[in-house]
Image (cartoon, rainbow, N blue to C red):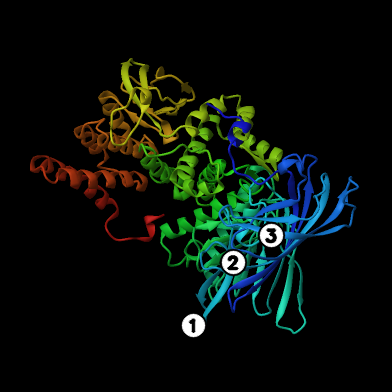
């Protein structure tokens, strides 16, 4: 089921690989009076020996094509810096004779009178103008109200996935990495910052403008370039490892950045230690943008955020608001390594960027705030969101072939983020943290400042663990959906239980599977737990059926499949298993995440017609003493759903409501209706 690199690349619409950028020197001057900007790009290029092989009609190549969108070009020329050929001597300059703009393909082609030299180093200089649009993409404007109540504008960037081309002509593909030098000319009263610290800041003649030049970036993709121009206050702190972190806020709101600042400094240090590679840049800025399309964007060294996802008053903010800000920050900072330092070669592996960051945001938040029980919440949050969408016939695989880059916008969904994070959580559980972490570290070191395919990470984990990672993960990432594992037979003995398991594709509507559908199968890690904890023995269920034997500490002991809810699947237990588990539920020797998982599975199975409502109600009756927030997320959903369904049946409603009241009042008697300081997170 695994795909090779050449298979995956087939059909991709890419710019020619015979001309490659190594460095961009970018100059921007924004004009707020008419919402435009002037730009000048000097791009260092190398040409390959086969440059002329693909030219039409046997002619030599005279064209350079870049990505461009909504830019107006004044001129383009190149200088030969180094060549091994005599036809274009070093120092020779060539002006473009024709500029062709293709609005459909979002490209610009500069046509020159003479052939471009092969195996040469060139510097291409382009002068152009663009628009400070109000579409929250490219180099765009945002409106805000200052501390005096006046409406003003600032400018910032949002380049992922395909909008660097709105700010400067470029090879706007993640694998075409280069170094970037940025220079901004802005009004003297405004602040400006970019991915890297300032190199110089000088006032220009006339005294109204200043030119700020920034240090060169590391080698990186175009979508990670960023800069901001406007009025800002800031708060700052230094991590224990010596990185300066700033949070930029609208004027007068700097105090609202302190909570995010604390999250950032702690998580940067945590990621340093986790990946075994220090944060590669000398600073990290985080800035709140008044008008922002997403939650945040992980630009390297300059992370941009929607205001509500960065700025809060920690003395007034709810627990939910604090957790939201913390996880958005930890998500974006995970990308500083996973995505920025090591980048996917093409957009069909976007899921790996976002899936890993979705896992890492919870890991780092759990390190910073262990009392938040982030991994318990993962089950009723990320995992539940993924399974709701992925149980539909209209779902899609995690890895989706993308030919035209524009198609990437269609896969920014809960499959990429939430199911992606869930399969990363699964592989961590299977490998164990030591092999998981060492494999990641080896992957980062080997591919730093480069691009990778998904199987590069599988190979790193396979090497660190000795387990069949590629085989297992292919079944989870290259086909849509997830399995239902049903216990079809059971044999209970005094010291062990033998279970026969069957797997099939789970669909939330319970629709009948075709013969082809019935052939679908996953390589499922079977993780179990008893009152003694998670069992060390694990098998991979590769076929449609499997038999497992689990030791029991006592003859009336219980066993739970999918321990820790680490595998994105549904489990249908037998009545005997549910009866035995009632002891673990009531005594809470069954962990909270597993108590919640039983409810989520049971409710989904009832809605799919795979389990009787009576069985779910019987299971629910064991939760009368429940007081865990995560478990109550599941309880509340079931009570609300059953109430809606049973309201038209007076007899069933008469049985259900007293039981529901007993469960709710059990919680009321413990915590009451009013919030108290002892409530915790």
Secondary structure state at the residue bearing disc 1: loop
Percent coordinates x, y for residue 461 in the rendering: 61, 31
Residue positioned 54% across, 41% down in the render: 402
Indicate the position of residue 626 as horizontal and vertical percent values: 30, 43
Circle 3 sits in a helix, a strand or a loop, which is it?
Answer: strand
Quarter where residue 583 is shown: top left
The residue under label 1 is 149
Q: Nearer the viewer, residue 587 or 463?
A: 463
Specify which label sits upstream in the sequence, 1 or 2.
Answer: 1
Badge 2 density bin: few <14, some 14–19, many ≥20, Cα 10 Å = many
**Disc nearest the viewer among 3 and 1:** 3
Q: Who's the residue at 31% across and 19% down the image? A: 488
Q: Horizontal and vertical percent for residue 147?
A: 52, 81
Mark linked to residue 156: 2
Image quadrant of residue 470?
top right
What is the C-alpha distance between the residues marked 1 and 2? 21 Å
The residue wearing badge 3 is: 99
Please name which of the two marks, 1 or 2, marks the residue nearer to the observer: 2
How packed mark 3 is, by other alpha carbons closer than 10 Å (few <14, some 14-19, many 20 or more), is some
């Amino acid at each position: 089921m695994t795909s090779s690199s050449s298979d995956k690349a087939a059909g991709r619409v890419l710019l020619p690989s015979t001309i490659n950028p190594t460095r961009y020197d970018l100059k921007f001057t924004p004009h707020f009076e008419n919402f435009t900007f002037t730009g000048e790009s000097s791009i260092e290029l190398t040409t390959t020996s086969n440059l002329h092989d693909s030219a039409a009609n046997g002619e030599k190549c005279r064209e350079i094509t870049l990505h461009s969108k909504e830019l107006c070009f004044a001129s383009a020329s190149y200088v030969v810096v180094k060549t091994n050929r005599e036809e274009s001597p070093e120092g020779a300059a060539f002006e473009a004779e024709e500029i062709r703009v293709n609005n459909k393909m979002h490209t610009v082609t500069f046509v020159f009178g003479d052939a471009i030299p092969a195996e040469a180093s060139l510097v291409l200089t382009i002068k152009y103008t663009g628009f400070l649009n109000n579409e929250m993409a490219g180099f765009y404007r945002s409106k805000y109200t200052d501390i005096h109540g006046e409406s003003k504008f600032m400018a910032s960037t949002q380049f992922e996935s395909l909008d660097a081309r709105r700010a400067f002509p470029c090879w706007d593909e993640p694998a075409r990495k280069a170094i970037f030098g940025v220079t901004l000319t802005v009004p003297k009263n405004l602040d400006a910052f970019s991915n890297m610290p300032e190199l110089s800041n000088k006032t220009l003649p006339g005294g109204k403008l200043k030119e700020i030049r920034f240090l060169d970036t590391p080698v990186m993709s175009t979508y990670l370039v960023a800069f901001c121009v406007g009025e800002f206050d800031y708060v700052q702190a230094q991590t224990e490892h010596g990185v300066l972190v700033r949070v930029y806020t609208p004027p007068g709101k700097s105090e609202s950045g302190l909570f995010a600042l604390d999250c950032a400094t702690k998580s940067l240090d945590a990621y340093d230690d986790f990946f075994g590679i220090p944060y590669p840049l000398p600073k990290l800025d985080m800035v709140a943008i008044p008008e922002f399309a997403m939650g945040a964007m992980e630009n390297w060294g300059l992370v941009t955020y929607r205001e509500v996802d960065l700025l809060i008053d920690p003395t007034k903010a709810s627990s939910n608001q604090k957790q939201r800000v913390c996880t958005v920050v930890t998500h974006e900072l995970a990308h500083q390594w996973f995505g920025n330092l090591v980048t996917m070669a093409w957009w069909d592996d976007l899921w790996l960027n976002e899936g890993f960051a979705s896992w890492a945001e919870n890991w780092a938040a759990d390190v910073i705030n262990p009392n938040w029980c982030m991994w318990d919440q993962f089950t009723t949050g990320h995992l539940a969101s993924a399974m709701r969408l992925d149980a539909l016939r209209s779902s899609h695989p995690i890895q989706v072939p993308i030919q035209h880059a524009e198609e990437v916008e269609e896969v920014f969904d809960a499959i990429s983020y939430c199911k992606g994070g869930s399969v990363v959580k699964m592989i961590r559980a299977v490998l164990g943290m030591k092999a998981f972490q060492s494999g990641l570290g080896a992957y980062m070191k080997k591919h730093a400042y480069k691009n990778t395919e998904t199987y590069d990470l599988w190979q790193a984990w396979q090497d660190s663990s000795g387990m069949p990672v590629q085989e297992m993960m292919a079944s989870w990432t290259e086909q849509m959906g997830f399995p239902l594992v049903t216990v079809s037979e059971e044999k209970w003995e005094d010291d062990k239980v033998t279970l026969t398991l069957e797997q099939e594709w789970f669909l939330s509507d319970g629709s009948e599977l075709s013969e082809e559908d019935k052939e679908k199968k996953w390589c499922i890690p079977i993780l179990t737990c008893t009152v003694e904890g998670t069992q060390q023995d694990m098998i991979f269920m590769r076929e449609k059926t499997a038999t497992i034997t689990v030791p029991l500490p006592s003859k009336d002991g219980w066993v739970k499949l999918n321990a820790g809810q680490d595998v994105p699947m549904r489990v249908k237990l037998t009545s005997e298993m549910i009866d035995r588990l009632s002891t673990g539920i009531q005594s809470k020797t069954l962990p909270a995440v597993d108590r919640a998982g039983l409810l989520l599975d049971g409710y989904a199975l009832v809605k799919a017609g795979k389990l009787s409502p009576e069985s779910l109600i019987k299971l629910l009756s064991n939760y009368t003493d429940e007081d865990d927030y995560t478990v109550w997320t599941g309880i509340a959903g079931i009570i609300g759903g059953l109430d809606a369904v049973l309201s038209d049946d007076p007899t069933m409603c008469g049985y259900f409501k007293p039981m529901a009241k007993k469960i709710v009042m059990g919680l009321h008697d413990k915590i009451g209706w009013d919030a108290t300081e002892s409530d915790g997170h």
